[in-house]
Image: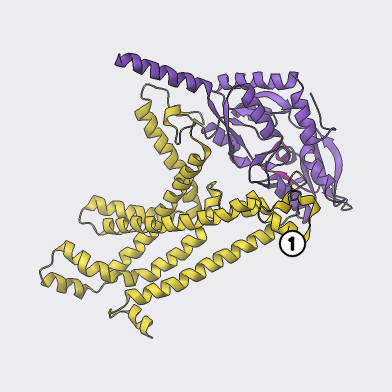
């Protein structure tokens, strides 16, 4: 009898466990409109809305974890969270360390922005980029002088106070900043395509979770809700699927 | 918070500022000051305890205990604080998880370190992956607290060891002549007189501890520095209160906070010094009466 009860209890536990699998999602929280902390002190943005939707569709219980960008891959590997959803582009170099899901944001060209009228040279000047991004990697191999900052916002501040001549970042990130600078900042140079689309980063040993999230991404792509989200957060001109 | 804050785009001036300064994010900023104070309130006694244990270990008659005490104090004092602060929480966390993995999941034979991944079974994770975010935050805070206690404990240990040696030998000899045991001499003669010699060093240490609290930020705890940086960064209209780069003002507020804290501490230590030097023929009492 006792054994029977124990088995029943165990069955209930494993059943609820399987139903409400908790997945911890790691994000930076400092890359608007992708992910940021809103005025209420809560995480908000395109990826927060998308992540919650994906979890709902995959019947997962999701928790959000904020983590600095430069340690976001090491902390995924050491198990602090189970997936990175932080505007991370798929690159060959990152694929050596972690796996990626399906892309949920199409490959978006990167742009340079500089102070209006400064006549900045993006090929020989000092260009700011966030540490450990595709942009920093690109600049390191170019003829420009690279200055790195821990957060994207600091790269903009560096251009504004003259520490850097220009900044290289995702167009989706720069567009609202340039638009709201009252003409102080302008796009300069040509757009360049670095890296692939944006996807969730996963541990290589987490194949089952990756399959679940892939199915959820397929589902938001096919019913058009992903395109609606992109338009809501990045405007009508943003690249769509 | 206020009813007129419903649409921040329609208000300006002081009204806007009053709404801006009472957003949920600012409340988190104000609350983070108590995180700093809590850390100080917990780290100071913990460090004193570690230091006391270290100083006692240094005075032990057993060579291995003595060596451990000396080793602890010398090692921690000789390593740069920041390196130690970054190392200890990671190392402790992995050590705890490794031990739990070995006891809770002994059936798994694969090594924990595979390539550059540190993998323990789900049951061994600290805190468990299923626990809510606040548990993770408290765990992170406790690891940071332990790092603070370890580092400042070593400095406190050295101060206390010196203070114990500064108590005049004649006092101890007189106590021995009265037939007191080693233990009695320590608790009744040495310890009460030691504090006055330890206090200048300890007050110095407290000041350094106060000034080291922003290291919490380095350990990923959301302290005052984290929120000052976060709030001061320029905001686009994705936020309800867009503004330019205001970090200068936020950090200025932090300067004022820390200056007030150290100023208050100095006054309290001056009082303590007078209290401990009462009735003692030492440098401290001379200072206190002059």
* The chain in purple: A
Q: Residue at x 75, y 53 (%)?
A: B243
Q: x%, y% of residue A226? A: 74, 26
* The chain in yellow: B
Q: x%, y% of residue A238? A: 82, 32
Q: x%, y% of residue B42? A: 42, 55
Please identify the quarter of the rendering in which residue B270 is found: bottom left
- What residue is pinned by disc 1? B14
Q: Residue at x 44, y 47 (%)?
A: B142
Horizontal side of residue B57 vs B222, given as left or right: left
Q: Residue furthest front?
A: B3
Kind of element beneath mark 1: helix
User: Camera-side residue: A92 or B194?
Assistant: B194
Q: x%, y% of residue B123? A: 42, 28
- Residue span colored magenta: A125-136
Q: Is residue B178 magenta?
A: no
Q: Is residue A130 magenta?
A: yes
- Tell me the quarter of the image containing the C terminus of chain B: bottom left
The answer for which chain carries disc 1 is: B
From this view, report whether residue B122 is shown above or below residue B267.
Answer: above
């Amino acid at each position: 009898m006792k054994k029977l009860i124990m088995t029943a209890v165990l069955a209930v536990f494993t059943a609820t466990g399987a139903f409400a699998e908790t997945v911890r999602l790691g994000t930076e929280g400092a890359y608007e409109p992708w992910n940021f902390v809103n005025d209420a002190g809560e995480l908000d943005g395109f990826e927060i809305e998308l992540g919650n939707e994906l979890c709902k569709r995959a019947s997962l219980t999701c928790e959000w974890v904020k983590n600095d960008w430069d340690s976001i891959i090491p902390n995924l590997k050491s198990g602090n969270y189970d997936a990175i959803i932080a505007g991370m582009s798929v690159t060959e170099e990152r694929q050596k360390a972690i796996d990626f899901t399906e892309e949920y944001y199409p490959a978006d060209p990167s742009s340079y922005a500089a102070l209006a009228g400064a006549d900045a040279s993006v090929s020989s000047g000092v260009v700011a980029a966030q540490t450990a991004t595709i942009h920093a990697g690109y600049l390191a191999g170019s003829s420009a002088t690279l200055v790195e900052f821990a957060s994207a916002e600091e790269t903009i501040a560096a251009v504004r106070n003259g520490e850097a001549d220009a900044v290289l970042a995702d167009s989706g990130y720069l567009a609202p900043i340039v638009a709201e600078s009252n003409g102080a900042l302008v796009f300069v140079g040509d757009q360049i395509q670095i890296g692939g689309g944006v996807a969730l980063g996963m541990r290589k040993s987490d194949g089952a979770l990756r399959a679940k999230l892939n199915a959820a991404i397929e589902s938001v792509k096919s019913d058009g809700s992903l395109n609606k989200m992109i338009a809501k957060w990045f405007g009508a001109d943003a690249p769509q699927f | 918070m206020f009813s007129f804050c419903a649409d921040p785009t329609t208000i300006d001036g002081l009204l806007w500022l009053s709404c801006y300064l009472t957003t949920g994010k600012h409340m988190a900023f104000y609350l983070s000051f108590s995180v700093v104070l809590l850390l100080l309130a917990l780290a100071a006694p913990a460090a004193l305890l570690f230091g006391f244990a270290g100083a006692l270990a240094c005075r032990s008659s057993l060579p291995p205990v003595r060596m451990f005490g000396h080793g602890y104090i010398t090692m921690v004092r000789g390593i740069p604080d920041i390196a130690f602060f970054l190392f200890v929480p990671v190392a402790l966390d992995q050590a705890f998880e490794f031990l739990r993995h070995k006891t809770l999941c002994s059936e798994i034979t694969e090594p924990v370190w595979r390539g550059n991944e540190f993998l323990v079974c789900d049951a061994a994770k600290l805190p468990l992956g299923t626990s809510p975010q606040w548990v993770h935050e408290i765990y992170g805070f406790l690891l940071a607290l332990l790092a603070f206690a370890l580092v400042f404990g070593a400095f406190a240990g050295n101060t206390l060891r010196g203070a114990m040696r500064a108590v005049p030998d004649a006092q101890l000899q007189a106590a021995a002549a009265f037939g007191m045991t080693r233990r009695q001499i320590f608790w009744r003669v040495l310890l009460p007189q030691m504090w006055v010699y330890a206090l200048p060093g300890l007050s110095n240490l407290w000041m350094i501890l106060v000034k080291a609290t922003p290291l919490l930020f380095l350990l990923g705890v959301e302290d005052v520095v984290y929120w000052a940086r976060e709030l001061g960064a320029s905001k686009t209209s994705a936020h309800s209160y867009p503004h330019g780069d205001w970090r200068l003002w936020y950090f200025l507020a932090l300067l004022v906070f820390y200056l007030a804290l150290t100023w208050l501490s100095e006054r309290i230590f001056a009082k303590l010094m007078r209290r401990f030097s009462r009735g003692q023929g030492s440098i401290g009492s001379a200072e206190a009466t002059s």
